[in-house]
Image (tube, helix red, strand yellow):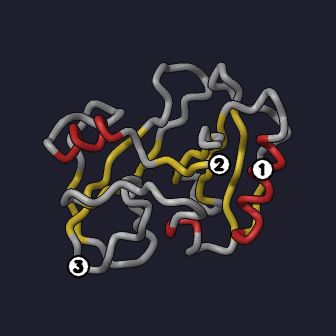
Amino acid sequence: MKYKTYDQDFVRSIRAGGPDANGMPAERAVSDGEGKPCRCCLKNIPEGDAMLILAARPFEALHPYAESGPVFLCEADCTPWNDDGLPPILTTSPDYLVKAYGADDRIIYGTGAITAQGNIDGYANTLFARDDVAYIDVRSARNNCFLTRTIRDAAP
């Protein structure tokens, strides 16, 4: 499986002053270094670094399951996460909300679970064993903020 960054076209648009999911420009702030995970590099934004706060909706179409909420981005260009394994933003909390979606972008009921940090990959692999799972979203277990999406790795 592969953890994905937020859509890079959206990230570039936001950094250029384009509208967020609510049609608003991103707010600018300075990171205090705690709990400010960038959805591009999938790392915590370091203390003192400029950051953007914006509304995001990780779904292409509007529908009842297309949740939106606040996310953070490094204000300066950062290198999008493209490594194997658990991204750094999934190593800063003891647990996360993990839930699966079907190809129709609807939550597959019964899959949502608060999952210990050390079991995210294991639980995701269990979910990906099901034919009806198209992708899995990982969210904050405390604030429900979208963190990252994982997909089946197409590599052999």
Answer left or right for 121 relative to 45. Answer: right
The quarter of the picture where residue 136 lies is top right
Percent coordinates x, y for residue 132 in the rendering: 79, 27
Q: Secondary structure at mark 2?
A: loop
Identify the mark nearer the N-term, 3 or 1: 3
Percent coordinates x, y for residue 121 in the rendering: 72, 59
In the rendered structure, which amino acid carries the disc numbered 2? Met
In the rendered structure, which amino acid carries the disc numbered 3? Gly
Q: Secondary structure at mark 3?
A: loop
Camera-nearest label, 3 or 1: 1
Percent coordinates x, y for residue 32 in the rendering: 32, 78
Q: Which residue is mark 3?
A: 48
Q: Which residue is mark 2?
A: 1
Mark 3 closeness class: few <14, some 14–19, many ≥20 residues within 10 Å: few
Number of numbered tags placed on the structure image: 3
The quarter of the picture where residue 42 lies is bottom left
